[in-house]
Amino acid sequence: MTIDFSPAPILTSREASLGSLLRLPDSLIIERILILLAPKDLCSLALTSRYMHVFARNDFVWRRLFFAERDSKSTRLVYRGNWLLTYLFHSPEHDEACSSHPLVICPVQIQDVSSDYLSLQWHRSNMFFGHFYPPPPISPTPTLGDQHSTGPTIPIEDYQDLDEDVFYRRYGYPNKPVMIQNSNVESWPAWKQWTLDALAAKHSDTVFRVSNIESDTKPSFSLCFKDFLHYLKYNRDLNPFYLFDPCFAEAVPEMGTAYEVPKYFRIDYFSLLKGSARPPYRWILIGPQRTGAPWHIDPSGTSAWNTLLSGHKRWAL
């Protein structure tokens, strides 16, 4: 008889926690498996191991659950600092119970749990973009025999010098993008009226349409402006939702006259379509840091003009 006194292999925390799921990457476990579970099953799973405790609390999972079960007729959303608490205390009636507890915006530290996927999630969702300014354009320096440039640059024109005929000949008919400066947007009423503080003071209960690019079934929903501002201030989402409303001027008629259509775009072909036949043709966008959209063609193939009143936005063309 042989007695083996060799010690049993020591399992890592991840091996002990995940069992047969060990070979799967963390992203697949969270984004493809855990999203299939019901809330009670997720809470039960969180009690089984350290890793499952962390995975089952992930914001990606609970945000999708929240919007899957949210009443589509509701215009309220009380964000509680993460989506698990927002799911559990989703109603304004919970405000009093939550008033003595601070918003939870930092992850709970769990010993012996390490995940590159979760670490990347946290760093991306907490990165500050305020100091990320685009570098000044640098003209490519051609070299002898060089057949390639560093890429096309978008021309910048002066609004006061560029008349309509030249605009259409250079950019409109060839369908080329252009940036136009000195268009006097500072004189628009929107320049002062569309700051967050000014909008909050006047339209806190106004309902706008909000886009949620992480939702497969409900990519947009209605939300009162004060709840959107609260979310904008406290969220740490990887892909935050953002106000993106094509009917803002119908909801608040004075907003339809707070800006001036540039001289190049005053011919409105969509106006030939009456009533519901006319597709959306103007939008207001408000979003926090990290807001964005994937590659797309604008609705109805629109060659849209854009004006940025606050913050920074990058376009990739």
Image (tube, rainbow, N blue to C red):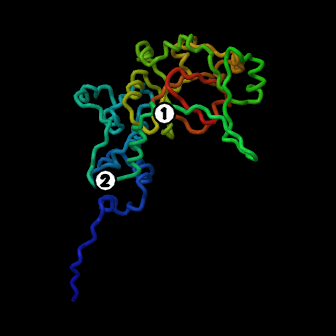
> Label for residue 132?
1
Q: Residue at x 23, y 81 (%)?
A: 4
Q: Residues within 10 Å of mark 1 (few under 14, many from 20)?
A: few
Q: Residue at x 56, y 38 (%)?
A: 294
Q: Residues within 10 Å of mark 2 (few under 14, many from 20)?
A: some
For the C terminus, the quadrant is top right
Q: Residue at x 71, y 30 (%)?
A: 176
Q: Which amino acid type corresponds to the residue marked 1 in the rendered image?
A: Phe
For the N terminus, the quadrant is bottom left
Q: Nearer the viewer, mark 2 or mark 1?
A: 1
**Residue that protrudes farthest toward the bottom in the picture:** 1
Label 2, on which residue?
A: 113
- Could you say which is closer to the camera, residue 80 or residue 221? 80
In the displayed structure, 82 sits above or below 30; it is above
In the displayed structure, 48 sits above or below 171; it is below
Q: Which amino acid type corresponds to the residue marked 2 in the rendered image?
A: Val
Q: Residue at x 37, y 52 (%)?
A: 115
Q: CA distance from mark 2 to mark 1?
A: 32 Å
The location of residue 144, given as percent across then percent down, is 75, 45
- Could you say which is closer to the camera, residue 41 or residue 116? 116
> Label for residue 25?
none
Q: Secondary structure at mark 2?
A: loop
Q: How many marks?
A: 2
In the displayed structure, 262 sits above or below 114; it is above
The location of residue 193, given as percent across then percent down, is 49, 13
- Could you say which is closer to the camera, residue 122 or residue 21? 122
Left or right: residue 80 versus residue 1 is: right
Left or right: residue 305 versus residue 309 is: right
Q: Earlier in the sequence, mark 2 or mark 1?
A: 2
The location of residue 255, given as percent across then percent down, is 54, 13
